[in-house]
Amino acid sequence: MLDGGAPAALHDRDRETSMRAFTPLALTVAVLALAACSQPAEAPVAPEPAPAAAPTLGGIDLTRPLHIGGNEPFWAIEMTGPEMVYSGVDRPEQRAPQGQPTLQGTMATWESTTGAGQPLRITLTATDCSDGMSDRVWPLTAMVEIAGESLTGCAATASAHRAAGESGRVVDPGQPAG
């Protein structure tokens, strides 16, 4: 007999019954605790999207350096990628961040502000252009607005401009003049 006069066998049976009830509960709690500590399954990694195609206009890659020029008055803009550099006869050189063009149909437009605070807007159109002073045919027509002045001219890649002769199409070396 143990405390209170209950036989020892009764206490052993109560303990065994308590343990049977406790064992499934303990296992359930242990499984849930382990599940809470485990790392969640990682979501499958999506493939990286393909890089966006370079903006083009009339077959000209607009991410390449561009040369835009006109005359009467003589002026030029070099588009280097990070900046646009405007220069002209009897005009101060002005620089502006280049940014990305807005493409709409056969036109590409850049809008910026020069370091001197002047608005600069360049619109290139995919139409052949003659500068009126040479026998060259440029692949793009340009309209430029700077400091309240509107200028018209022609454009091509800077490498095509450097390689151009006094007549013919202004194209990159190795490109068909077609």
Image: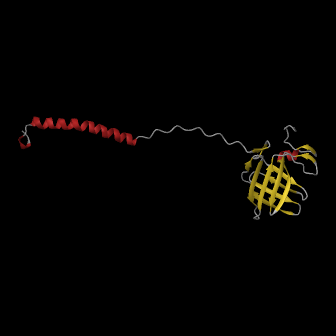
Apparent side of residue 35 relative to residue 93 in the rendered image (left or right): left
Q: Which of the pair 14/145 is nearer the observer?
A: 145
Quarter of the image for residue 51 reads top right
Q: Please tell me how many numbered marks the rendered image carries.
A: 0
Query: In x, y percent, where is residue 97?
Result: 73, 56
Please say if 158 is above or below 35. below
- Hey, which residue is sitting farthest front in the picture? 105
Quarter of the image for residue 50 reads top right
Query: In x, y percent, where is residue 124?
Result: 80, 50
Colouring method of the image: secondary structure
Q: Quadrant of the C terminus?
A: top right
Q: Which of the pair 170/14 is nearer the observer?
A: 170
Q: Which residue is pictured at 94% across the width and 49% down the height?
A: 134
Q: Quadrant of the N terminus?
A: top left
Q: Which residue is pictured at 79% across the width and 53% down the height?
A: 123
Query: In x, y percent, where is residue 28?
Result: 31, 38
Query: In x, y percent, where is residue 75?
Result: 87, 57
Quarter of the image for residue 38 reads top left
Q: Which residue is pictured at 76% across the width and 58% down the height?
A: 96
Apparent side of residue 134 relative to residue 124 in the rendered image (left or right): right
